[in-house]
Amino acid sequence: MTDVRYTVRKWVKPEDLNQHGALFGGRLLQWVDEEAAIIAITQLGTTDLVTRHMSEINFLSRADRGDLLEIVYGVKAFGRTSITLDCRVTNSVTGADILTLDSIIFVSVDEHGTATPHGQTVATPTTERVRLDHLR
């Protein structure tokens, strides 16, 4: 849908490892969801949103202590109340794919948790929508 891409880098530290000495999958999913939510907030201009759906999560290879990961997101689509992102995680040094997600869907909600229209249709590379929401 758009050429706007967001890249976040994470360094795998000892506290991120599982019992096999590899990056704990749950930690990686935490990073992916948290950063995706930040992107959705900047796109929709509101902090009032929830993760609605994550597509099949494909763990393709392991990450180890000291690895530098690159998490790249793209905006796939805007719905009336939602935004859909995609995500790819790679090892910055080796280029190996670590994880892919075809879609992460967030929904804008009101104070009762009911889906509400957000009014956005085009991706922005900046955070001005969040600042504008703050001024209202």
Image: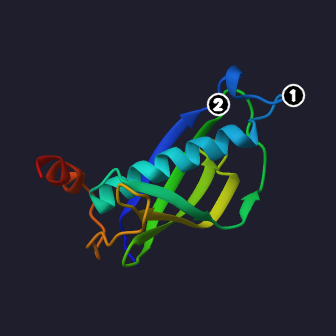
Residue toward you, 97 or 130: 130
Say which residue appears at 63% left-offset and 50% top-offset: 90
Name the residue type under label 2: Val
Residue toward you, 9 or 78: 78
Q: Quadrant of residue 41?
A: bottom left
Say which residue appears at 42% left-offset and 65% top-offset: 114
**Location of residue 20 with respect to 121 vertically, above or below:** above
Name the residue type under label 1: Gln
The residue tagged with tag 1: helix, strand or loop?
A: loop
Q: Position of residue 73 (x, y in %)?
A: 48, 59
Residue ID for mark 1:
19
Q: Where is residue 31 in the image (x, y as percent from the top left)?
A: 57, 42
Residue ID for mark 2:
12
Residue at the front extreme of this rendering: 112
Say which residue appears at 55% left-offset and 36% top-offset: 10
Residue toward you, 39 or 88: 39
Coloring scheme of the render? rainbow
Which of pointers 2 and 1 lies earlier in the amino acid sequence?
A: 2
Q: In which quarter of the image is residue 63?
A: top right
Residue at the top extreme of this rendering: 14
Say which residue appears at 21% left-offset and 57% top-offset: 129
In the image, 73: left or right of 103? Answer: left
Q: In which quarter of the image is the N terminus?
A: bottom left
**Location of residue 103 with respect to 59 vertically, above or below:** below
The residue tagged with tag 2: helix, strand or loop?
A: loop
**Eye-nearest disc, 2 or 1:** 1
> How many numbered callouts?
2
